[in-house]
Amino acid sequence: MGIIMKAILLFGLLAIQSMVWAETPRWLERHMPQPALVGKGEMRWLALRVYEARLWAPAGRYSLNEPFALQLVYRRSIERDDIVQSSVDEIRRLFGAPPALAQWEEGMRRAFVDVRDGDEITGVYQPGGPARFYQQGRLLGEIADPEFGRKFFAIWLDPRTREPDLRRALLGQAG
């Protein structure tokens, strides 16, 4: 196969991969009407890619009064306990120590998993309802306390987040 054919094949594969990544996960339709991409970004620690993030909401409009989903595609292996501890630390940094924090931590330990490069984890926020967590569209678990969802997703979406550039990108404000 000639170099031009190889280049065309590689370009085609990259285009297909891009289309698949940009396509709305069909299973999100169970949680919200007309799920559409609000924004996307990448989380880096130093120079290392940690995950790619996408925010999905009805008709592509984010609001805490409507359901939404935060999809993370990991680019590194991270143990569940590290994800849980980081989440607890960020909730505590943003909100102090909510009375239910220990219960939420235990719920996260049940619902979260170790991740490897390429694993997709999606958290679904339902106003006044449980936060649900999925791996490649398969339900991992949920935390029923509606206050948990507001505080957990604030890690990425609150103006006080540690990653303001990622927040802007997720909200479609980066440019």
Image (spheres, rainbow, N blue to C red):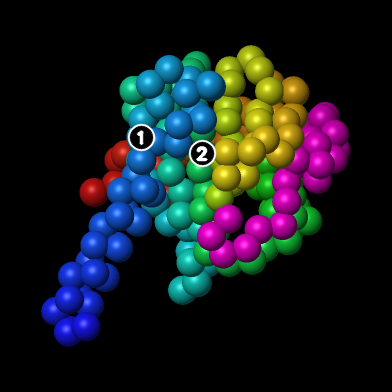
Relative to residue 61, is residue 149 drawn left or right? right
The relative height of residue 115 versus residue 138 in the rendered view (above or below) is below
Q: Which residue is rendered at x = 30% and y = 48% of the image?
A: 19
Q: Secondary structure at mark 2?
A: strand
Q: Amino acid at mark 1?
A: Val
* Viewer-proximal residue among 107 and 95: 107
To which residue does mark 2 refer? Answer: 70
Please tell me whether residue 6 is drawn above or below residue 115 in the rendered image: below
**Residue 116 covered by magenta stretch:** yes
Give neighbour class at mark 2: few <14, some 14-19, many 20+ (Cα, 10 Å).
many
State the extent of the magenta-drawn residues as a range.
96-119
Q: Residue at x 40, y 26 (%)?
A: 35
Image-based side of 107 in relation to 149, left or right: right
| Disc 1 secondary structure class | strand
Q: Is residue 171 visible?
A: no
Q: Earlier in the sequence, mark 2 or mark 1?
A: 1
Q: Marks 2 and 1, Cα distance to the nearest angstrom?
A: 10 Å
Residue at image mark 1: 38
Q: Is residue 170 left or right of residue 172?
A: right
For residue 24, above or below residue 35 = below
- Residue 125 lies, in percent from the top left, at 58, 27
**Residue 118 in sight:** yes
